[in-house]
Amino acid sequence: MAEPVAHNESVKSRPTPSRPQQGAITPQGTLAVYEPGSGKLLGEVRVSTAAQVRETVQSAKAAQTEWARKSFAERREVLLRFKDLLLQRADEFCDHISRENGKTRNESLFMEVLPVADATAWYANNARKLLKDEKISLHMFPHKKSYLRFYPRGAIGIISPWNYPFSIPTGDAVAALMAGNAVVVKPSEFTPIIMEKTRALLEEAGLPRGLFGVVQGKGDVGAELIKAGVNMIVFTGSVATGKKVNVGAAEQMIPCVLELGGKDPAIVLPDADIDTAAKKIAWGAFANSGQTCASVERVYVHESIAKPFTEKVAELARNLRQGEPNRHDVDVGAMTTQAQVDIIKRHLDEARARGAKIVAGGEIKVTPEGARFVQPTVLTDTTQDMAIIRDETFGPMLPVMTYRTLEEAVKLANDSSYGLSAYVFTKSRAKADEIANQLIAGTVMHNDTLYTHAAPETPWGGVKSSGLGRVHGKHGMRDFCEVRHVNLERVNFPAFWYYPYSRKAWSTGLRVYRTLLGHGLSSKLKALFGKH
Ligand code: NDP
């Protein structure tokens, strides 16, 4: 096993060696997967043809008919067994995820396996309550009663990225399955194997064969999946691909949820606990080598505490141990793809050329075997118009900027085409709450970063270019269902507005509405018919 790469070790940047590239299709029609932390071949998966994509969706739909008839208790039993098996095999799954994606062993546990186990248990235990009929009171028609009913949509297509190759698709899949759906996943071409292992574990837990399908390949296979008869698409990935997926879903007239990128800001107020803020922001920026949609990618710190904060966060960055990911004594792992390393390099080079200072890190290392590492890096003197502040970097880069007034900080934080998450550090909860109202983001966290993706009760998603719709929580779960409205009669009321039309009906109607809308009598009318 390779030793961790020491920070002061000078390994020159060099291109990835010439051999089948990670994510490329081999002449044998497979995707070869190389470990980002070592460059070794991990395995291969066969690429699906368009016909196989359609067959997988058809099999999933066939299995779904029976699955939807099962009670919540029966579905719960299968998914809780999956959760138990996953916890038993946590070591094996973490080992595999670290090898395939390059995150550290602890990150594979805390950011992939444990959140999925917990989300599975939560959806399994709460689906019945979240999806029970919801009554609607009809203020103008109290003689009737309405219900919302949540029916499974059929087959949910999940197209997922490489940065959380297990927790993103599986977290959504377990919610969709508990709601009575089938699922077909198209994993990223860079991290395809873990979904094969997930399918095997779900089937071992008792999930009917075919109900959870996996199709493999590059973007064209994702595009095929959208056309293959699925009833909804959940896409997590880049903004550019998200737009194509949105168009593809519109052509099929199916709903889609888009979980896209971010450029998430953290605002540090003068009263913040500097140690806590530095620690949590460092984790928010460097965990998973910064390859998290909600990574802290910009910090705005009040000028009065900028010096101690920057020193603290730089010291933390320097002390992180980086190296071969699959170990417990490594804090920062490898970069999953070379393409992402190239983006980081471009942002870093431009920032440096335009006057930014590197106060920690700054090196990019690619070993002769093809392992790639970017040092956790803290920068100062960046400006709002640099690519490292405007575009998603998706690497362990932490630019720290200063502000004078809170209005200025909020304005700078909102100055982005993205709006996934935002973070506020202050000892005052009231102040944090007030700032939360001004930040344009899907989620605002106080004195913390990233973690609510692992809280299944809370919705996840962004505004602006960060996406459409929400996954997780009640809203995410209900989105996996068609909402149907059922309207039943409570009392046979002799309606006067039907045929034959008359002048009398017209004036009665107008008088009734003027009275009810003018004097708030609808509640009295309701009281007359009793509560419902
Ligand atoms: P991509 O958009 O490149 O790919 C995402 C998935 O879409 C992959 O499986 C990809 O396949 C597939 N795909 C590519 N082209 C098409 C197409 N035309 N039709 C259908 N599917 C297609 O994103 P990345 O994998 O690079 O993921 C990184 C991005 O994901 C970042 O921007 C990050 O912020 C975002 N993200 C957002 C999250 C959120 O919750 N908001 C969470 C995590 C990541 P292939 O890889 O085989 O090309």
Image (cartoon, rainbow, N blue to C red):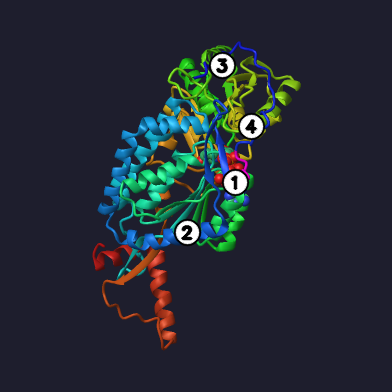
User: Label 4 neighbourhood size at 10 Å, few (<14), some (14-19), many (20+)?
Assistant: some
Mark linked to residue 498 = none
Q: Name the quadrant containing residue 106.
A: top left
Q: Is residue 233 magenta?
A: no
Q: Image height check: is 267 above or below 170? A: above
Q: Read off the residue under disc 2.
A: 57
- Mark 3: which amino acid? Val
Marks 2 and 4, how far apart in space? 32 Å
- Identity, as a three-letter code, of the amino acid under mark 1: Gln
**Left or right of residue 26: residue 202:** left
**Amino acid residing under circle 2:** Val
Q: Is label 1 or label 4 in front?
A: 1
- Residue type at mark 4: give it: Gln
Q: Is residue 242 visible?
A: no
Residue that extends furthest to the right in the rendered view of this protein: 353
Q: Earlier in the sequence, mark 2 or mark 3?
A: 3
Q: CA distance from mark 2 to mark 3?
A: 44 Å
Q: Residue at the location (43% across, 87% down)?
A: 502
Q: Which badge, 2 or 4, comes first in the chain's sequence? A: 2
Q: Closer to the camera, 246 or 518?
A: 246
Residue highlighted by disc 4:
338
